[in-house]
Amino acid sequence: MSVRDDTDDGRDLRKPFLHTGSWYRMGSGQSGMLGSSQAIRESSISVLGCVLIVALGPLQFGLTSGFSSPTQDAITEDLGLTVSEFSIFGSLSNVGAMVGAIASGQMAEYIGRKGSLVIASIPNIIGWLAIAFAQDTSFLYLGRLLTGFGVGIISYTVPVYVAEIAPQNLRGSLGTVYQLSITIGIMLAYLLGIFVQWRILAILGVLPCTILIPGLFFIPESPRWLAKMGLTEDFETSLQVLRGFDTDISLEVNEIKRSVASTSRRTTIRFAELKQRRYWFPLMIVIVLLLLQQLCGINGVIFYSTSIFESAGITSSNVATFGIGAVQVITTGLAAWLMDKAGRRLLLIVSSSGVTLCLLIVAVAFFWKDSVSSDSSLHGILGIISVVGVVGMVFTFCLGMGPIPWIIMSEILPINIKGLAGSVATLGNWLFCWIITMTINFLLDWSSGGTFTIYMVFSAFTVAFVTLLVPETKGRTLEEIQFSFR
């Protein structure tokens, strides 16, 4: 079979799940894009609009992450769960996310970024309904697994889609919208958990993906994915829609075409080829960054922040937990503003250094608190210090360690290994997230100070790793970044 036949067969197998551009091709009876330019211009949608629509996915992610903290007491009482059973419930979303992560890269390669998000939305909706109407652990666990599966796909697909549609001068800021949406979802879960019953909160969790599915029909597919699939006409039309119809896209089109032409048309590469620096070095950076993001303990703190504040002696623990959510949103918004000004690498160093310092403060406060009488004024002061340290940890984490590893993943992985490598990195992130959330309750029962000391050590390692090995990607096109590893 000829090369041309192979290519044509591959294209037939990889038509976009949601065909790009059908809604704005209103002048198809006229010749070319110029004939329908007025109709297209009236229907075009900005990059920001596309990002806001797909941001409903990470908003769902945030609701899933934040759900267990304000609902722990109510679910435990209503369904008669033990601490171990609720810990399993809290961690099952990570198990589901691991399965979703395994599927996410290849799914995004074969049916497109938008098609993957449709697939991810369906189990999310079913999962929230299963949780809302659960009468025992079976439906509760099933629902948590399904929402986790959808979140696992979302956690890979959304950062990649945003990076592939964003212009280089806005890629960092728009990429941070992913993490910002997660933090908004967590804050909403904390806030609504104070006022509404847990079953109602689960029903409200259905809304983001219910809105996301129709929204995906109104945005274009990733032009870089279309170019890789050989769908040249759709690729150029998608890019023109994203950049605006008064913009000359010829330079960007040629750069993307050269990048695609310089990579293998195979969807997989041989294991031996991973020994090449262009592959193993960016893959190593992405995997280590995403593992270290979890090993500082942030998701354990978020999932069980109410219990942590109670152990610190804070009586209004649910209100304090909502305060954590608000801090996340504000800080991630600040990070979005700084991302394309300060750069990724500097923000990562500042962020991981701040997390290390705050974890040290919390560890010392808990160790000291255990050695003084609970009736003394010092005991109360140390409780306040530990809470300030936890809030400081969340603040500094969201400034860089929260959003930037996902942005770097979407920027530095070569296009011909992005699906597989992204799946492996996302799987590792969710595996360690599961380990952290599954063990934090037991670790806190063992020693609160010891728990935060362990997290501090990993955070300190992050500072060294970023300083020595992570490159700056600000102000460079995706093609320039990936070429620099050759």
Image (cartoon, rainbow, N blue to C red):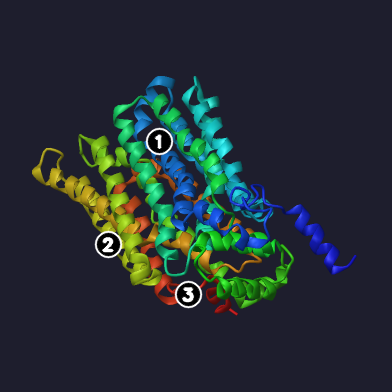
| Residue 323 horizontal side relative to residue 65, left or right | left
Nearest the viewer among 143 and 57 is: 57
> For the N terminus, which image quadrant?
bottom right
Residue at 46 percent across and 69 percent down: it is: 168
Q: Which residue is drawn at 34% across and 34% down?
A: 70
Residue 170: % across, % down: 42, 65
Report whether 448 appears left or right of 153: left
Amino acid type of the residue that numbered disc 3 sits on in the rendered structure: Arg
Q: Which amino acid does label 1 sit on?
A: Ser
Give me the residue at 28% from left, 52% from top.
330
Q: Which of 123 and 50 is in front in this view?
A: 50
Q: Could you give the CA–CA distance between mark 1 and mark 3, rounded to whole angstroms? A: 40 Å
Q: Which mark is residue 40?
A: none
Numbered disc 1: secondary structure: helix
- Residue 357: mark in rendering: 2
Choose between 355 and 65: the one closer to the eye.
65
| For marks 3 and 2 on the same chain, the one whose residue lies earlier in the sequence | 2
- Distance between mark 3 and mark 2 Cα atoms: 32 Å
Q: What residue type is labelled 2?
A: Leu
The label shown at residue 68 is 1
Mark 1 against mark 3, which lies toward the viewer? Answer: 3
Q: How far apart are marks 2 and 1 (CA)?
A: 27 Å
Q: Name the residue under label 3.
A: 476
Going by the image, does 308 lie left or right of 240? left
Q: Nearer the viewer, residue 189 or 37?
A: 37
Query: Residue 243 at what x, y percent from top left?
Result: 50, 63
